[in-house]
Amino acid sequence: MGDIDFTKPEYYTNRELSWLGFNDRILGEARDTSLPLFERLKFLSITASNLDEFFMIRVASLKDMVHAKYTKKDIAGLTAGEQIELILQETHNLVNLQYSTYNRSLIPALKKRGLQIIEEHEDLTADQKIFVDKYFEENVYPVLTPMAMDSSRPFPLIRNKTLNIGALIRKKTAENKAEKEGHESLEFATVQVPSVLPRIVCLPDGKNGEKRVILLEEIIERNIGQLFLNYDVVCAHPYRVMRNADLTIDEDEAADLLKEIQKQLKKRQWGEVIRLEIEDKIDKRLLKILKKEFAVKDADIFEISGPLDLTFLMKLYGMEGFDDCKVKKYVPQPVPALMNEDDIFANIRKGDILLHHPYMTFDPVVDFVKKAAKDPDVLAIKQTLYRVSGNSPIIAALAQAAENGKQVSVLVELKARFDEENNIIWAKMLEKAGCHVIYGLVGLKTHSKITLVVRREEDGIRRYVHLGTGNYNDSTAKLYTDCGLLTCAEPIGEDATAVFNMLSGYSEPKHWNDLAVAPIWLRKRFLKLIGRERKHAIEGKPARIIAKMNSLCDREIIEALYAASAAGVKIELIIRGICCLKVGVPGVSENISVRSIVGNFLEHARIFYFYNNGAEELYMGSADWMPRNLDKRVEIVFPLKDEKIRKEAKHILDVQLADNLKAHILKPDGKYEKIDRRGKKVLLCAQDYFCEEAMKRAVVPVDPVRDRVFIPAEHIEEE
């Protein structure tokens, strides 16, 4: 066992290809005909949105490596250039499957249900043409700005992710002259499809109340001649570019981080084009111009059989009148420990409180900050903010607390990807309200989720703490599965104070009571915990690890898991997205299983279980097992000390390990397969189970240990 080389590239899966596999699992939900129709639209929209971000960040980063002649290989033995080649192959296949699903399955199903998407403006009826032309004249035409390219006007700057219509036009007076001279006199022109207008335009209802819609770009394409009155429009086709949106910030050289990020955000719109989407029937002459001006290779061009940018399907999902085509909206339930007349501080003093979102409402977290803002006995509030909602009640409460004279310190992470602009706005607002705003540490993202409330009580100062696995975002808390802990345990209170002193004053604590904090201490803690299970297995003792997270791609952690598996440790991983570990490798990972759950909610919680020879230890936190989380971010992982809460967290893991409806199982060939349900007497979807459980407990609060109704995973097949 000691002679095994766990660093061999064949023991690892490339990170980017693993992510594409995750997006393919989401696409599998869009293809699942057992799901309500509009839920399938939603999943297809998510795959498109995911792919956009993947190219803007991950593929862009690989392109930068190629330009810099960076030749170091990844853990799977691939150079950046080799990764790009494989990514483009897989992505072309994925996009073809997206549009096959859209055209062959979803469009016919929508029409059958009474919703028709007019795909070509030529297919409009006479009455619809009148309606569309009037809509264009009154609503669209005044907003459009056509741009041409000729000897005096260079190719216009096309913004990242915008949908555009490119056209070849010809002067009417020049037509005959050009033909006589034996060449075409064509000019390029383009117009951006305005994002300020709805992309989905409802047409007058058809027979039997059938709803009909058309996309804005089709309306513009139909009327594009009105933008070029002295020209003939030879052809017009939609196109879209994806640019490098990965911010490069030299924080050591930036005198003002806020101003530097604002400057870099503007550059995001004009980065290198890394992907060009075009209509598959595009005129080859028009394509030649686009290809030249954007400097893209054939592999970077995606010919689309259908509407570009399928994220519009999320807007379609929001249409009224199709409730039978959607999963019934789940309403987050009250937290049993808080279903009484006591205030939140009194309830926390009774004992630690576990929150499980979105099954339990996020309101207690908001109320925690709101109550602290108004409570005259609260002296200080300290909080880290990574992503918040557009109209955040937590931001409002923090501002009110400062106005009420409390000491308010807020770390706003300006480098939260694609939330930079929002966070800059919030930071400025909080500063104006009198809060002390920290912009994070140089070279690190602060990704931890922690709130500290310092309160004066009869027996002295008491510290109340909220720790979480997800962001302080009341909107996404209804969509993401996350866990949180409310506690006033003094050891954690002391650690929380040390965290904020470290963030604001750069003081490194000499020791921690309970919290494990990245980037200095967390990696060591995880390696020690994994190593302890390995030691127990070598000694012939039972050894087991269960870990739930979003991604696993850290080589050192994977090597430790391989060593533990080789020693006989049973390792069960619940990983939503990226997994660079391979299962079933003889002598290496035969004791490791990996499952990915893709469902109505985005699995986001991080939970870690170690058997520890019967003295079980459970942890939750903000960190995945990725190099960036362990080495380049401020992350917090916290232990669960209360016995009831430990059993509750273990219960969450047990239910997910028993899921046989939404779980995908990783196979030795690197592919994921859903569990064969044939012959299964009990079918279990973990997310549905937690919803039902939360609703039952909201009616009659139960003891989470004594009154459990769950069928344990190991007995599920016998029932």
Image: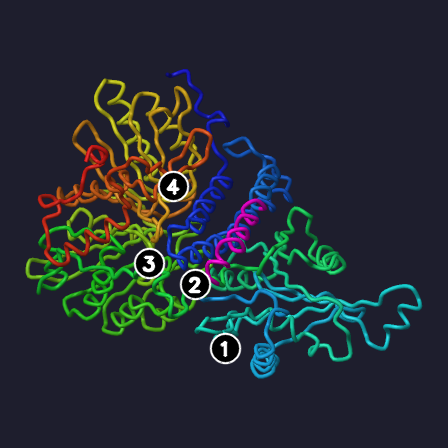
Amino acid at the residue labelled 1: Pro
Q: Earlier in the sequence, mark 2 or mark 4?
A: 2
Amino acid at the residue labelled 4: Leu
Crowd rating for badge 1 (residues with CA inside 10 Å; few <14, some 14–19, many 20+)? some
Q: Which x, y percent locates residue 56? A: 54, 53
According to the picture, the residue beneath numbered tag 4 turns out to be: 630
Which is closer to the viewer, label 3 or label 4? 3
Spatial CA span between label 1 and label 3: 27 Å
Instruction: Left or right? Give the position of 417 relative to 270.
Output: left
Amino acid at the residue labelled 3: Val
According to the picture, the residue beneath numbered tag 1 turns out to be: 204
Q: Which x, y percent locates residue 423? A: 41, 63
Residues 372 and 151: in front is: 151
Which is closer to the viewer, label 1 or label 3? 1
Crowd rating for badge 4 (residues with CA inside 10 Å; few <14, some 14–19, many 20+)? many
Mark 2: secondary structure: helix
Q: Which x, y percent locates residue 509? A: 28, 45
According to the picture, the residue beneath numbered tag 3 turns out to be: 327
- Relative vertical location of residue 444 with respect to residue 150 in this rendering, above or below: above
Q: Are marks 2 and 3 in contact (CB under 8 Å)?
A: no
Instruction: Left or right? Give the position of 67 relative to 380.
Output: right
Spatial CA span between label 1 and label 2: 17 Å
- Relative vertical location of residue 332 with respect to residue 73 in this rendering, above or below: below
Residue sticking out furthest to the right: 181
Instruction: Find out whether residue 192 is within the magenta segment.
Output: no
Which is closer to the viewer, label 2 or label 4? 2
Bounds of the magenta segment: 92-113
